[in-house]
Image (cartoon, rainbow, N blue to C red):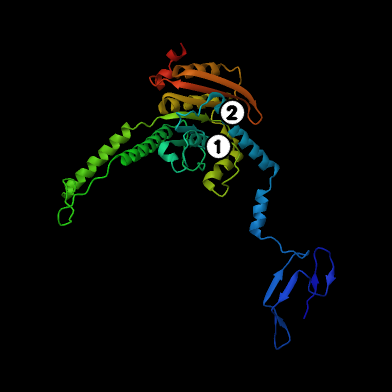
Amino acid sequence: MYARVRSGCSGLHVNTIPRSIELSRYSQRPSGTLMFQSIRHYAYDGSKPESPQKSEIARLEKITPTRQKIKDQRHHHTKKIQLIDEKYDIFNADVRRVVDLGCAPGLWMKYAKDRILWNHRLSEAGFCDEGFIVGLDILSTTPPTGTSTLQGNLISKYSMQRTLDLCKELAYRQEAKRNELATPLKEEVIDENGDLIETENDVDTTYFGKEQIDINNELKLKESRANVDYKVDLVLSDLTSTLKQDRGFWNNTQTKPYLRIATNPKLMSTVRDQTKAPFDLADAALVYAIRLLKENGTFVLRMNAIHPEDPEIELLTWRLRSVFRSVESTEHLDSFSGVEFFLICKGKDDSVDVVEAFSYKAKL
């Protein structure tokens, strides 16, 4: 028994079952009607349509003008640090520890990791034993494998302390692993009967004795962490406008800040005068560099959206020269963010503290 079928594409009325439906394995009921056990749907051209998953993947992989612009912007952003590295050799053989301020979306962290692996001939597994990379940004981002990130406000004292604590923790882990490998294993003493002889350190103590041992070990651990050399070789600062999001849309922690910034432009207006905002962030980055960099360390500062003749540039240069022995600047026109400045500071003087760097004596 056939039913009338209306074709929405051609507007024709047919009295037969269309070719898009294949009937198979049907049985005859006693009443003379057909009972269909399976129906397969095909396209009108006879080919089987793609699954929804494959169609979605093809749609996402399709390069649209917006996606191409984001891809070009990310490539251009990575190219900047590469050109600075080739010209000023900031990732030399002495660089093993790096801090990236304004790390989202992690492009500079990935480049730093690749350069450290190449310079020291390290594998992915051995990277955490020889160095570390720490990133800080107000936006949440997924760090490259083997690196660490913190989400926080750069000008917050709490974020500064968290960054210091993380660097100390990573440095302590590396130092503890080296000491563990260098410490010989304790030899076991066995008597004539084959029983293990207990030494003085193996003798069971009372409950309070064990508690005292745990307290002493904890104090030694805190003391060793406080005395560990946690300072880094290089500090990168890219506190400019955020790149567009291109991945991690399913993660609300990563996506919602982008949506809020897009729908509320006032969130980007942290100060009343936007032309002075880059200098405030540069001063904050300088404080991090003074606290985190070791002697003769390197500090790379990127700034944009500033006027080339702004007197604040000279004041910032004075502050940098009071801390670093060599300060070089480069300026070029960026197609995405306009005029931008790079300040490459080398030879950090460890005797200069934050108060001295921001005092009037630094200007003389």
| Viewer-side label of 2, 1 | 2
Residue 298 is situated, as x and y percent measured from the top left of the image, at: 47, 25
Q: Residue furthest bottom?
A: 30
Q: How many marks?
A: 2
Mark 2 neighbour class, 10 Å CA radius: few under 14, some 14 to 19, many 20 or more: few
Vertical side of 331 occupied by 157: above or below: below
Residue at the (33%, 39%) spot, across then down: 176
Residue beneath disc 1: 107
Query: Helix or strand or loop: what does disc 2 sit on?
Result: helix
Residue at the (66%, 49%) spot, across then down: 61
User: Mark 2: which amino acid?
Assistant: Leu
Residue beneath disc 2: 83
Examine the rendering and report whether any part of residue 277 can be seen. no
Residue at the (23%, 46%) spot, across then down: 187
Residue at the (56%, 16%) spot, across then down: 311
Residue 335 is situated, as x and y percent measured from the top left of the image, at: 66, 29
Q: Residue furthest front?
A: 192
**Front residue of this view, candidates 73 and 184:** 184
Vertical side of 88 occupied by 127: above or below: below
Looking at the image, residue 165 sits to the left or right of residue 320; the answer is: left
